[in-house]
Image: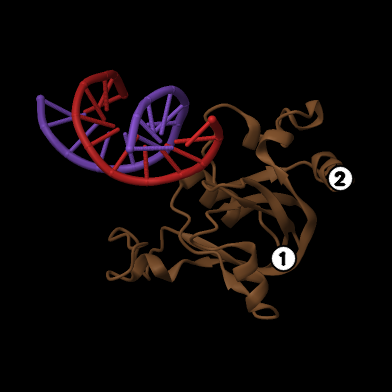
Chain colours: A brown, B purple, C red
Amino acid sequence: MNYWLIKSEPEDFSIDDLKALFPRTEPWDGVRNYQARNMMRDQMRMGDMAFFYHSNCKEMGIVGIMEIVRESYPDYTSWDSDGNHFDPKSTEENPRWFMVDVNYQRHLSRLISLSELKRYSQLSELPLVKRGNRLSLMPVQSTEWEFILSIE
DNA sequence: GCCAACGTTGGC
DNA sequence: GCCAACGTTGGC
C-alpha cells in the first residue's frame, strides 16, 4: 500500500467539508499538473492512505487522513465548458485528466504545521518541505508516514 | 498583496 | 527544439 500527501486550499475544500460528506466520498477533481496526474493515474490504488494538507491559508499543515476508495477515472470536470476546470484539449474519447475518489478517515489529534514539519530531519526528503515545491499531490514514504503519526 | 519558483504556451 | 513571455501555485 502507498501513502500520499494531498493539498487543498481549505477555502476551496477543507477536511471538514470532506468529513461532512461522510460516508459519501469525494471525487478529487481539478488536478491539472502532469506529474500529479501520472502519480494519481498510475500509482494510486484503492486502500492507499493520504494526508490531507491545508495549503495557502492561515494555518497551513497536515490536518487529517483520507483513504483512496476508487482508482483513477476521467475527470469529467475537464469537459465542462462552464466550469473552472475546463480543458478544451480533454475529450471523452481521449481524456487528458484523471481523478480518484477519497473518503474521510479522521482528523489528526492536532494540526501539524508546515513550519514544524520542516524542522524534522526525518522529513527532509519529503517534497513538501523542499524549496520551490508546488506539487499538489506527492508520495510519502512509509517511514515518513509513521514518523508523522508518531508526533501527532 | 508580493513575489519566487516553476510549468506551459507559442513564436521563431 | 529553443526560450521568452506568461500564468499559476503557494509560502511569506
Quadrant housing the N terminus of chain A: bottom right
In this view, A143 is above or below A105: above
The CA distance from mark 1 to mark 2 is 20 Å
Quadrant hosting residue A89: bottom left
* Residue found 71% across the figure and 69% down from its top: A104
Q: Which residue is mark 2?
A: A146
- SS label for mark 2: helix
Left or right of A152 in this view: A68: left
* Residue found 34% across the figure and 63% down from its top: A84
Task: Give neighbour class at mark 1: few <14, some 14-19, many 20+ (Cα, 10 Å).
Answer: some
Q: Amino acid at mark 1?
A: Met
Q: Residue furthest bottom?
A: A23
Horizontal and vertical percent position of residue A71: 63, 66
- SS label for mark 1: loop
Decide if residue A1 is in sight here: no
* Chain to which the residue tagged by mark 2 belongs: A
Horizontal and vertical percent position of residue A146: 86, 45
Q: Depth-wise, is mark 1 or mark 2 nearer the camera?
A: 2
Horizontal and vertical percent position of residue A51: 71, 53
Left or right of A115 in this view: A41: left
